[in-house]
Amino acid sequence: MKNTFEFLVDNARTVRDSAARANEAALGLVRDCQGTLNQLVQYRTDYLANAPTSRTQPMSPDLLAQYHGFVARLDTAIQVQQAELERRTLFAAAATQRLMAQQKRLRSIEALITRQNAAHQARAAQQEQRASDEFAARRGFHMTAGGAA
């Protein structure tokens, strides 16, 4: 029986550790994605702040079209990155839920083993007490029988 419990605990720990690694990887992907999004937004902000405008410098229609096209591509990249961040955030939340479920499972198995061990110790203590009582009763019987004879 003990080997079965050891196997269950070892298996639950292995699964929990695997879930923890997957969770950490998912959270790392979220951090990376957030960093990329922040870089894109900062680049767009800097580009808009430093780009020539028609008020400060005259721009040719071709240059103006390129400028607007580039800003539009930056906006698209930001939108794609935001969607990716949302997707990865949901994936990370699911990974966290899986980790929590595996931790709960491991704690449940450990609690079961603790209860089983406590019950086993209680039975052993009862058997020991019973044996001690029987010994005392026999000893008392022999002393009474021996003393009466």
Image (cartoon, grey):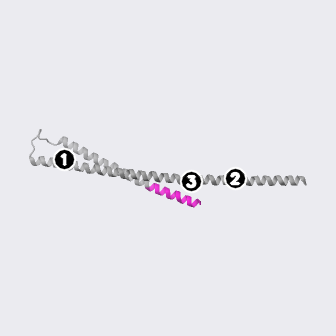
Q: In which quarter of the image is the N terminus?
A: bottom right
Observer-nearest residue: 126 or 7?
126
Picture coordinates of residue 124, whole percent (x, y): 67, 54
Magenta part of the protein: which range?
A: 1-18
Q: In which quarter of the image is the C terminus?
A: bottom right
SS at badge 1: helix
Mark nearer the viewer, 1 or 2: 2
Residue identified by numbered label 1: 71
Residue identified by numbered label 2: 126
Residue occupying image coordinates x 59% and y 59%: 2
Mark nearer the viewer, 1 or 3: 3
Direction from residue 23 to residue 62 in the image, left or right:
left
Neighbourhood count class around disc 1 (C-alpha, 10 Å): few under 14, some 14–19, many 20 upward = some
**Distance CA(mark 1)–CA(mark 2):** 81 Å
Picture coordinates of residue 112, whole percent (x, y): 56, 53
Q: Main secondary structure of the magenta part?
A: helix
Direction from residue 110 to residue 20 in the image, left or right:
left
Amino acid type at mark 3: Leu
